[in-house]
Image (tube, coloured by chain):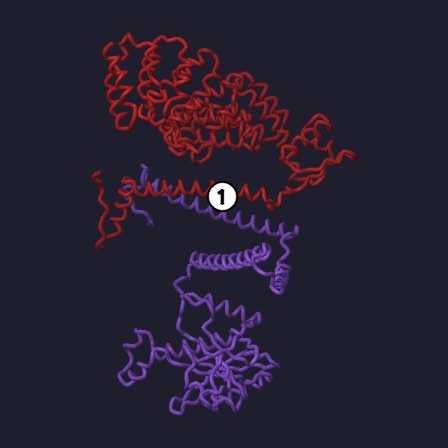
Chain colours: A red, B purple
Amino acid sequence: MSTLEAVITSIQRLSATSRDLSALHDVLKGANDSLRTNSDLQLTTLDQLDPSKHSLGYLYLLDVLSCGPVSDVVPLIARFINGCDAAQIRLASEKFVSICKRLKDKVLELRDPLRGVAPLLAAVRKVQVSNKRLTALHPDCLQLCLLAKCYKAGFSILSDDILEVDLPRDFYLYCYYGGMICIGLKRFQKALELLYNVVTAPMHVVNAIALEAYKKYILVTLIHSGQFSVSLPKCASTAAKSNFKTLCTTYVEVGNCYNNGMISELEAVVVANSSEFEKDKNLGLVKQAVSSLYKRNILRLTQKYLTLSLQDIANMVQLANAKEAEMHVLQMIQDGQIHALINQKDGMVRFLEDPEQYKTSEMIEIMDSVIQRTIGLSKNLIAMDESLSCDPLYLGKVGRERQRYDFGDDFDTVPQKFSM
Amino acid sequence: MAPSSSSGLTFKLHPLVIVNISDHYTRVKTQFNPPPSLCATENASNNGEAMLQPNPRVYGCVIGVQRGRTVEIFNSFELLFDPSTDTLDRSFLEKKQELYKKVFPDFYVLGWYSTGSDAEESDMLIHKALMDINESPVYVLLNPAINHAQKDLPVTIYESELHVIDGIPQLIFAHTSYTIETVEAERISVDHVAHLKPSDGGSAATQLAAHLTGIHSAIKMLNSRIRVLHQYLAAMDKGDIPCDNSLLRQVSSLLRRLPAMESERFQDNFLMEYNDKLLVTYLAMITNCTSTMNEMVDKFNTAYDRNSRRGGRTAFM
């Protein structure tokens, strides 16, 4: 009772400057256990505090309260997240993260993920120390967006470049969910990048997340670039290289069939294994891959022929009739995947070169933005390079090698250990 | 000492003359005052000569064409000055003149040049001596002192005029104005000479920076001058300044000479070149990033690679 009052008054007093806040933080840490057992703590006590000014104290009390059986915790937490002060939150980020996770669980229980999307988006922005850091909240937010099917909201988080990661598991989940969101938005290029990151991430044992990601990765490569190679990229870990293939044999089979280019065979394989695809929830993706095979075949035709009749296209790509071929070609022209002219009088299609001359002023803007991005990237790389040069591990090894060469010279040898 | 001339002749000077004079002066100066590293090897007998005045005067002849009222000075050559008689070497001058006549039959000796800050009394003697070749020679004076504040060329042209001073008719030097006239070949060579840099500025980056700085300052100067013209025209428009029709005519003719920047072909070419440059910059940035990444990966491997060769040596660092 008295301790609760004391805690509340100290919260109200000490929430002004940063020095006070650290003192308050210590007070709260000390009082945490007693608060848990304190039965006086009710929702009404929270009314004495203002979430935007007393965020730290509010956070602690809310944490204690939400552990227990409280009704209607979702709007409470949501309101808190929207109103809290970011600087104060970052002092106790793990508590904040656990509160948000609780919000997510509750929202999932209520089967209404949409309610949690906006608060979690705000929470991610508030807990992020800098734009380049991955927090534990990123994958949760993305998961909610996926379940609520609001892909655009999730995509806004994905557009940041991540340079620092706290936990590898967060990173795997982030890339995996992010890849799925991009697939939902049909941005296959970005999905490919994200899934590639998971597949080639360093791991000692095979990771379930990475395995699922690998299956999706195969399918997205088929849709996007139309080619499949059985071997993983060289930078994938050895565990991945040896185990992935044996664990996803059906997908590898689909990929090989795709490479051969025969639609009928591919469809046969898909139908045969459809139950497995269904289990992995990848059936939609597989169907998209099958339809993309037509596109790939037509694309290959543009490299061989200058003009072709619609009937011939239909025959070569194993479509039913010329009408369907015309529809496919028309769709591809509209998407910008090929450049062609359809002459409807005699049913001939003439394939053209890419008319982009790169000399318009819009091109200047694109180039400018791309160059700016590269300059930013270069700055980051140089910073990383410099920090590595100062790394004592690196200096130790370089110094060791230098020592061997400087026999008889009076160079200073690099000390092996640094007293930090 | 040098009032303005009233002869009514227009003088045109070619930059070749200026370059020649300055070159002559620099050579003589360097020969007589060698740089400190060579000084030590001079023996005592030469010491007297080595201590000549810091700014030796050089002399020479200028040649060109006089058509009507226009005097155009094309070229120059050097002459030896005889300090004992205070005259220029006559026989040499005549020999040179004959040689030049063979190649340029139109040119004849128009006058002489020298270096210094101002015309002196002793110069009048030389001037009079030349009067038998040309009844009214010109005297071109180059001031070799480098003055960074001065924007104009330190070249003055003097004519001789007969003035009555204290009842005695005397020849004195009088300023004349002149314009610089260039042929295309001269412009290129002068440009080349002007951009000679000492050899340690040889790296590509500094040369590019110097080149771009030059272009930048040229454009800045052009911009400021156009701005002045613009303000002047605006003032004229408002009525602050009385309208000067001849100036307006000059401005309008200048504007009409501007290149046609509004045509579509120009835009096309311009955009294409601009985009090409952007693409090259992009390529350079990507190469830069790739090389940084390469170094970083090497460092990372040396630092964190557990399977590195512990006991062995690397082939080369």
Quadrant showing the C terminus of chain A = top left
- Relative to B264, say whether A126 is above or below: above
Q: Is residue A36 left or right of residue B264?
A: left
Residue B282 versus residue A282: which sits nearer the camera?
B282
Q: Residue A167, percent across and down? A: 36, 27
Name the image quarter holding residue B310. Answer: top left
Q: Secondary structure at mark 1?
A: helix
Chain under disc 1 = A
Residue A45 versus residue A385: which sits nearer the camera?
A45
Amino acid bearing label 1? Ile
- Outermost residue toward the right in this view: A345
Q: Is residue B239 left or right of residue A53?
A: right
Residue occupied by mark 1:
A371
Q: Residue B67, percent across and down? A: 61, 81
Q: Is residue B87 left or right of residue A282?
A: left
Q: Residue B93, percent across and down? A: 49, 88
Quadrant showing the N terminus of chain A = top left
- Relative to B21, say whether A90 is above or below: above
The structure residue drawn at horizontal position 63% and vertical position 60%, both measured from the top left corner, is B252
Q: Residue A123, percent across and down? A: 41, 23
Name the image quarter holding residue A89. Answer: top left
- Relative to B214, say whether A37 is above or below: above
Residue B188 versus residue A401: which sits nearer the camera?
B188
- Relative to A92, say whether B145 is above or below: below
